[in-house]
Amino acid sequence: MATHQFDHLSLVVSDAELSLQGLTRSIQVGSVDMQQGALYARDLSGALSVLGLDTAASLVEDVARQLTLGQPSVLDVAQGLLPNVASALKDIQLGHILEPDEQLKVFGPWSSRLQVLVSRDTASLSSFEAVAPKSTTAQLLGQGDPGFKAMRMKGLSLIQNARIVNQRDDERTVVQMDALLSELQDWTLRVGQVPLSQLFPLSAQAMQDVWLDSPLLDLLDPLRELGAQAGSIQAQSRSLTIYMDWLGLNLSNENFQKLGQCMAVVAGHVKRLADGYRLVFPCSLSRMRMTPYVQNGQRYAVGSGQFIQFDPHADGTGFAGLLTVCSGLANQTLQVERVLPAQNMNIFAVPPDIPKPEGVSGVALDAMGEIYHCLSMA
């Protein structure tokens, strides 16, 4: 391993530990310091994603979201979660990074606990039925749409917090304001979305509060038949990404290929489990969690539905490590010069009359308005 690479990793681990310490102090104070804790949590999430701990990073990002929203129920989950994060950081210092499956084993239970809290905090939305917009007409969504209900519940609070932050004069005000506005963007995405349970009504209880864009649901229609024989279907949403497990099912090779093709179309991937399959895909193709990276001096970004893992300990002069991505069933390994903290970004198609690098399907914009190319992997 190159010396400069080791120094870089040491600095990132050090930053992660400082953020972890700050977050630990904040949650010990309780709900009084939740906004400051949200900033530490976002910093920690960014460092974890650079270190290849994307599952933990995604989970800590969700903790940050709940802290930003002022949900005190997240404090107990955070207090139990942080020792596992500290342990993972110590493992990295010893040269061991948890593989994706190991990360799921360690952090999966905490993700489930957080999902229960999120579902409970938004329980009042369950009595509203989504109004799916029709693509053929300009239809106005009614007030019964749960996206509007969510925006009313959360949007007013977020905007008020942003106004309060705007009155302050300190170096972290801009960061906190950005976090609030990013959260508002994520909640805005809920407008017009439909429940994933429309695909599998019999499994509705196992996928509560999992929403996605209506056009995306249409693209996933082949899943109705492919997953019909599954013993159980469970799903949860985390950082604008949907994780759905089909258990008690063994598809034929032909149907497995069809499943992979379906996931590739929606910027996701599928993985075999011991007793079934895990499907990972975004809740929207217009805004999703992205991992930015630099390759050959050019900025790129890959969505969480196609991100597998980043190995920062890979040898190679001038390279930060190996980035593994997957579209449907097709894996690809990229040697990258740098990986940046994951964040939620808006996605735009590149107009056909504008020149673009080969293999690029669209662009993503980060919080600063920087442009990242999105590879076409379908």
Image (spheres, rainbow, N blue to C red):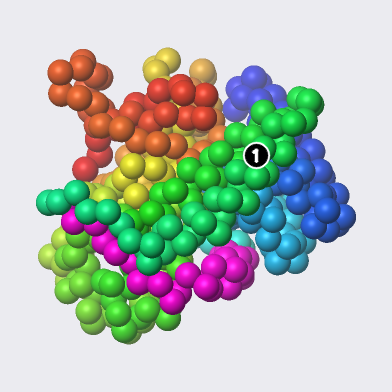
Q: Secondary structure at mark 1?
A: helix
Q: Position of residue 351 (x, y in %)?
A: 20, 25
The one nearer the camera, 310 or 190, is 190
- Quadrant for the N terminus in the image: top right
Residue 92 part of the magenta-drawn span: no
Q: Main secondary structure of the magenta part?
A: helix
Q: What residue is shown at x 42% (from left), y 15% (from top)? A: 297
Q: Position of residue 249 (x, y in %)?
A: 28, 78
Q: Which residues are magenta?
A: 108-135
Q: Is residue 168 above or below residue 29?
A: above
Q: Is residue 196 visible?
A: yes
**Near-viewer residue (189 or 322):** 189
> Which of the pair 16/97 is nearer the observer?
16
In the picture provided, is 287 more to the left or to the right than 68? left
The residue carrying mark 1 is: 162
Residue at horizontal 77%, vertical 43%? 36
Can residue 81 be spotted in the picture? no
Judged left or right of residue 246, residue 100 is right
Quarter-of-image position of residue 199: bottom left
Q: Amino acid at mark 1?
A: Ala
* Residue in the image at 17% along x and 74% along y: 225
In what quadrant of the picture does the C terminus appear? top left
In which quarter of the view is residue 17 placed? top right
Q: Residue at x 72, y 39 (%)?
A: 164
Q: Residues within 10 Å of mark 1 (few under 14, many from 20)?
A: some
Instruction: Identify whether 229 is placed above or below 46.
Output: below
